[in-house]
Amino acid sequence: MPHRNPAADSTSRVNSLLPRRNTESLAFGGLALLIAYAIARSVVGALSKPFWFDELCTWIIARQPGVKGIWSALERAADGQPPLYYLVEREASKLAGNELLSFRLPSIFAFCAAIVLIFLFVRKRSGSSCALICAAIPFLTLVYDPYAIEARPYALIIALVSLALVCYQHAPALPWVILMGTSFVLAQALHYYAVFTVVPFAAAEVALSLKSRKLRFGVWLAFACTLIPLALFFPLLWRQKLYYGEHFWAIPTWTKAAGFYGWSINYYTHRSLIPTILLVACLGAIVALAFPKIRSARSADPFFHEHVLVLLLLVLPFIAYVVTKAARGALDDRYTLAAVLAYPLGAGYLLRGLNRGAVVLAALVIFSALGMQEVNFWKAQRGHVGEMVSPAEPIERLVAAAGRPDLPVLISDGHDYLPLLHYASPEWNKRFFVVVDLPQEIVYTKTDSVGRSLLALQCCYPFRVENFQEFSSAHPQFLMYSNGSFWDWWYFRFVHDGDTVRLVAAEQGLHMYLVDLKDQSRTAR
């Protein structure tokens, strides 16, 4: 037997560990850079982006007096999140002097936390290099822009589901199971539709139970904790359903569920089925290649249940569609945004089976796409980095160009009215009006959600929402601002009714009309 040198063997083992340690260091360094950049970029984006309608709903409800005031506003359907979210925003509003930043800090920090948790999840099964590549994928989705800089709960839900994923990898250890149950409770207390995110976890646990023939009661108890906030806040959710009724704008459809994937990557037409077809083709190829492994998965792959989790997370929009369709509920793409987590997690499993060259190529593609995206962002910031451009300015210019200082201005799209109210000066706001006619809104848009939302918000914030009959009787002639959106329907109403509608000013797709109501048509109304 040849003589072995212990010192040489020790040196060889140390040298074999060096590349791995270097890779780990580089991966964690890259993760730190991603997080630092995400914070810096998100702060700039938050400071330069004015609040839009939904964020102003958050701003209004969070400023109500105490828990009782928030609960009372939500009972009147003034907004649609559970009360905890507004309490979080109330506390966040004290963290910075600029409200654009302070109200968005929870989303900024939540996005960064989600990136770290995604890295940890993928690293445990696929290594640090793959984990860093996968951690960059959410930057290419709408989770990053706009929802990481939006005063709404969607980024927070992503972070909490990411935490639950990491905890699930460590189950059934008691501390991790408790933390997982806590994450589900908090997610459900921030958004009603977070209950759907438990379905992939439950399916994975069923797969594991069938394989191991054991039932992990602690894990199921953690899942069941989701029902606690749902039961507590269900009366508020039910009031929402009753108030908005059958004409709520977010109707669940199969095409909406299928269009989620294009929407989530900001595809130029998010209702296109092209991303969905490509996704199905990729899944089919994976299943075909892995079929022998799937047949023996119960004995060969100890983590097969995690694959089930990721697959069910990927089809979360369809799960939500089936349930909401059966319950006659509402569904919008944002409500199932957690499905985006399946992109980096699934990529982690795929990259693990590729050779080094393919992994490097994937990294180049992802980081190149991210680089081009960010270059476009900074180009758009040129000249006003971190400075907000008021959404009231172009409308004020149009009103001034119309040359009718004595006339009121009807804001055709109700979504524009709250930002105007928030950012325009008091002098200008005296001229701006929003008018509701719920039956006619249904005729032209198939929904009366915008009008009902404005009416409900009056309980919390002082602004003018006038009935059209009252407004038309007092103002037979007025200016009308039109942005050309789907919700901008008043123009068609006036033309249909035979009123005189004349363009008096225009700027970059925005229009100002002079409207003269006929006496006979006004009397008929």
Image (spheres, grey):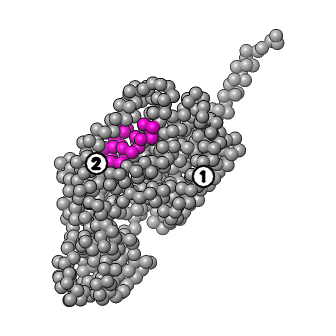
Of 426 and 349, nearer the camera is: 349
Q: Which mark is residue 453?
A: none
Determine the residue positioned at 51% across, 58% down: 262
Q: Which residues are magenta?
A: 182-203
Please tell me whether mark 1 sits on a helix, a strand or a loop: helix
Q: In which quadrant of the rendered image does the N terminus lie?
A: top right
Q: Amino acid at mark 1?
A: Ala
Of 294 and 122, nearer the camera is: 294
Q: Residue tagged by mark 2? A: 82
**x then y, percent, for residue 181:** 36, 34
Q: Is residue 196 magenta?
A: yes
Determine the residue positioned at 22% across, 48% down: 235
- Inter-mark Cα distance, 2 to 1: 38 Å
- Crowd class of label 1 (few under 14; some 14 to 19; many from 20; radius 10 Å): few
Determine the residue positioned at 40% across, 82% down: 506
Whether residue 453 is situated above or below residue 127 in the rendered picture: below
When asked about the image quadrant of residue 47, the answer is: bottom left
* 60 displayed left or right of 353: left
Q: How many marks?
A: 2
**x then y, percent, for residue 142:** 47, 55
Q: Residue tagged by mark 1? A: 281
**x then y, percent, for residue 116:** 49, 41
- Crowd class of label 2 (few under 14; some 14 to 19; many from 20; radius 10 Å): many
